[in-house]
Image: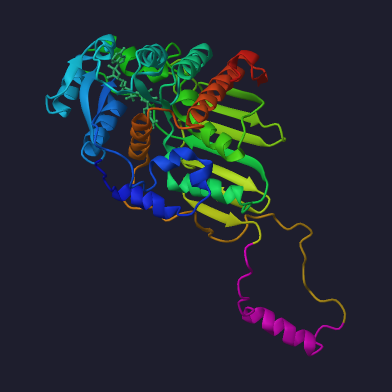
Amino acid sequence: MKTIRISRRDFMGKALAGSALLMAYPWFNALADKSSTDYSKKVKVGIIGVGSRGSLLLHYLNELSEEINIEVVAVCDNYEPHYQRAIKNTGGKAKAFYDYRKLIEIPDIDAVVIAVPLHEHAHIAIDLLNAGKHVFCEKAMARHLEDVKRMADTFYSTGKVLQIGHQRMFDPRYLKAVELINAGEIGKITQIRAFWHRNNDWRRPLPEGRTDLERKINWRLYREYSCGLMTELASHQIQVANWFKGKTPVSVMGKGSINYWKDGREVYDNVALIYSYDDGTQFIYDSMTSNRHYGLEEQIMGDEGTLEMEVNRRYWEHPPPKPEPPPPPGIVQLMKDIEGGIFSDAIPLTNSSWIPELKVEGDGKKIVNREKGFDESKAQLEGFIASVRKGEPTKGLFEQGYWATIWALLGQKAMDEQRIIELPNELKLI
Ligand SMILES: NC(=O)c1ccc[n+]([C@@H]2O[C@H](COP(=O)([O-])OP(=O)(O)OC[C@H]3O[C@@H](n4cnc5c(N)ncnc54)[C@H](O)[C@@H]3O)[C@@H](O)[C@H]2O)c1
């Protein structure tokens, strides 16, 4: 048996050594130090869709190849420049296809990474699972609710791994935060706010003279292929809210519009939604593309403290008092005057009847010390390969992705139909 010790895995193990998380979130075990893992068999991997994200995932897979004994043996893309680039990036060693069905026919491929546009996820993932392959596909799961459910049904019926990429689940910051929440460190969570703000048109340039490629390259901007901000960004933060609350919402309402980028796009350029949980907690979400001042954040608010996940900080509602600074000289003089009887009756002090409820003072503390160079997207690929080696999905991981996509799409529906949406029975998981 070949055993490989991996520094990243060691780090993850140490960062949360003895942590209840290893029990509560089994997918984390995939990265904890497991000196008994058998790496002797090479895992053969294929990748379908080698555009922007797929190229990065291919790069990570290449980087991991020796460490965890994997090999990218096939690539597939139906766009010539990306097809050629993918061949180059495997050193010409991988088989290459324009049609993903040819890749599926290769019998000894164990696992396939999908990085095609959203509307292509479902049928490719379902074909792969039915052909006995394990699948990694990043969020969101699919463009339509019924396709998400079909993917879930195929996942359960085949028993193969279908890992929906949500890299925050492999990020020590988020794992530590869950531990803090479960230990009651921020008290009862009574509100979650999250936002993702950008100030750009989200467009990708087309090759010279190729306006015919607009919808292929800028697929995120068109309803046929994507729900824009909801499926491409919000799904990440919905996953975090559900995970931290330990439950899924019961309803969603919202508003969205195109109020800035009137350039032919069909997806909203700003959205604002409220997701409600059964205990009365609201998850307030917004996203926009014309102001980036507040950037990206998930704010988890409890009656004892607050977590700001993206900036890696925790705060206390009642921070320990700081030592009193000496009173300013004016106050000292006034006190002396009072003691000396300068003022016979009224003391000339004005008093405000209203004290502004300013932000609680204090810089907080880091949630976790981050290892330089650690990359959670790469970590989730390691987690995927660990599940593939085991030959079975890691408990609880798929459902995180399922509910994040379902509520992203229901959020879109709530905005489109201008009504409060609850979970339809047919989308419930058994
Ligand atoms: N952090 C994350 O989780 C994250 C980040 C970025 C993108 N993504 C996801 O990755 C996916 C791809 O995004 P992207 O930005 O790389 O898009 P992209 O347009 O840059 O790349 C998509 C690639 O898929 C190819 N393709 C399309 N249909 C195909 C088919 N039927 N068969 C083979 N190839 C096909 C295209 O030619 C293109 O090369 C999306 O689902 C997106 O949501 C996830």
- Report the side of 239 relative to 97 (left or right): right
Residue at left offset 55%, top offset 26%: 403
Q: Quadrant of residue 108?
A: top left
The answer to whether one can see residue 309 in this image is no
Q: Is residue 340 magenta?
A: yes
Q: Quadrant of residue 158?
A: top left
Q: In this orientation, which residue lies closer to the viewer: 164 or 268? A: 164
Q: In this orientation, which residue lies closer to the viewer: 346 or 122? A: 122
Residue at left offset 79%, top offset 88%: 339
Q: Quadrant of ligand 1?
A: top left
Q: Percent position (x, y) of residue 173?
A: 46, 48
Q: Is residue 180 magenta?
A: no
Q: In this orientation, which residue lies closer to the viewer: 118 or 159? A: 159
Please, which residue is most extreme toward the front here? 1
Q: Percent position (x, y) of residue 98?
A: 22, 11
- Report the side of 364 relative to 216 (left or right): right
Q: Quadrant of residue 88?
A: top left
Quarter in which the N terminus is drawn: top left
Q: Percent position (x, y) of residue 147?
A: 48, 13
- Report the side of 295 relative to 218 (left or right): right
Segment tinted magenta in the rendering: 319-344
The answer to whether one can see residue 228 in this image is yes
Residue at left offset 75%, top offset 86%: 337
